[in-house]
């Protein structure tokens, strides 16, 4: 790769799943890649591949500043920010504590915003850059037991749209990626806490049905490989004029189409048919 095409890429949530897979591929393509996550020990393969691993807690502004300052000190610029860090809180609204709900927003929205705000002055100064926000098909639709998670992704969609308009005069692109069902740690992280919150009591029947349907959806053959999103991110990085949104992965496009064009009642029936 020529120096003109080589880009400095900062990826949050790079210790597993889509973040790690994308980081490894972008390193292979010749880019300068900084993967960041709390679990630094799980990013040793990034450094062995020629990338860089940084400790990062997106909910800690000092941690965010230190990570961004390190990249700027070493490289002098950041060309692409991939906001990938995030997780899902599932459980009935009544059963989910507000502390858990706040934590969901601290990571998925305010942590993402903190990283973006730290990177923006450098992108404005260079009058170029791409900010790629990993949303979800869940940012355009909904499922029972997922009110707090879905609401953060709905918020991210609107936040990104506003940011895109604000940054257009500075030559900075804002791109939203909406993955479908991808084989990652997502289901493992949300499954047991969902049952702990709502697996007994008035919402038990629905909670257990959602847990079972989620487990089935993420089983082998029922979910897409992270490579689907990696290929998309590689395409966006290379693009001179990327689209504002991309959707990819199992069920993403059909489910969002049903939600958009067939209305709430039909979508409700489709979703609930999967959790009986």
Image (cartoon, rainbow, N blue to C red):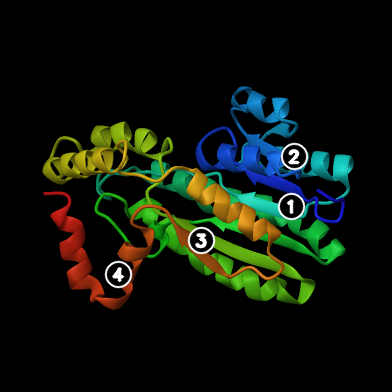
- Numbered disc 2: secondary structure: helix
Q: Position of residue 198 (x, y in %)?
A: 22, 39
Q: Is residue 191 visible?
A: yes
Would you say 265 lies left or right of 44 here? left
Mark found first going from the N terminus, 4 or 2: 2
- Numbered disc 4: secondary structure: helix
> Which of the numbered marks, if any, corresponds to residue 259?
4
Q: Nearer the viewer, residue 161 or 105?
A: 161
> Which of the numbered marks, if any, corresponds to residue 118?
1
Closer mark to the observer between disc 4 and disc 3: 4
Q: Which residue is mark 2?
A: 67
Would you say 22 lies left or right of 9 here? left
Mark found first going from the N terminus, 1 or 4: 1
Classed neighbour count for the residue bearing mark 2: other residues with Cα under 10 Å, few (<14), some (14–19), many (≥20): many
Q: Which residue is mark 3?
A: 156
Classed neighbour count for the residue bearing mark 1: other residues with Cα under 10 Å, few (<14), some (14–19), many (≥20): some
In percent of the image, x 64 and y 65: which residue is there? 174
In percent of the image, x 64 and y 26: which residue is there? 45
| Disc 3/disc 1 C-alpha distance (Å) | 17 Å
Does residue 269 sit above or below 196 in this rendering? below
Closer mark to the observer between disc 1 and disc 4: 4
Mark found first going from the N terminus, 2 or 1: 2
Contact check, label 2 and label 1, Cβ < 8 Å:
yes
Q: Position of residue 39 (x, y in %)?
A: 59, 27
């Amino acid at each position: 790769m020529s120096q003109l095409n080589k880009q400095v890429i900062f990826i949050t949530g790079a210790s597993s799943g889509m973040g790690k897979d994308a980081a490894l591929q972008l390193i292979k393509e010749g880019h300068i890649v900084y993967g960041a996550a709390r679990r630094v020990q799980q990013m040793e393969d990034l450094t062995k591949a020629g990338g860089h691993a940084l400790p990062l807690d997106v909910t800690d502004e000092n941690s965010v500043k230190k990570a961004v300052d390190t990249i700027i000190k070493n490289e002098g610029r950041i060309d692409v920010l991939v906001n990938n860090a995030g997780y899902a809180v599932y459980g009935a609204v009544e059963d989910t504590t507000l502390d858990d709900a706040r934590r969901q927003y601290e990571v998925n929205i305010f942590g993402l915003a903190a990283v973006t705000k730290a990177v923006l002055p450098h992108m404005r100064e260079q009058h170029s850059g791409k900010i790629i926000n990993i949303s979800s098909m869940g940012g355009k639709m909904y499922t029972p037991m997922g009110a707090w998670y879905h609401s953060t992704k709905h918020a991210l969609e609107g936040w990104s749209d506003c940011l895109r308009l604000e940054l257009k005069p500075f030559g900075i692109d804002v791109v939203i990626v909406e993955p479908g069902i991808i084989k990652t740690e997502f289901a493992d992280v949300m499954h047991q806490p969902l049952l702990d919150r709502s697996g007994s009591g008035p919402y038990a029947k629905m909670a257990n049905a959602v847990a079972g349907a989620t487990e089935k959806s993420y089983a082998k053959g029922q979910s897409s490989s992270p490579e689907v999103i990696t290929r998309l991110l590689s395409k966006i990085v290379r693009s001179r004029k990327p689209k504002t949104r991309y959707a990819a992965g199992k069920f993403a496009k059909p489910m969002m189409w049903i939600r958009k064009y067939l209305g709430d009642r039909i979508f409700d029936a489709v979703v609930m048919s999967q959790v009986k």
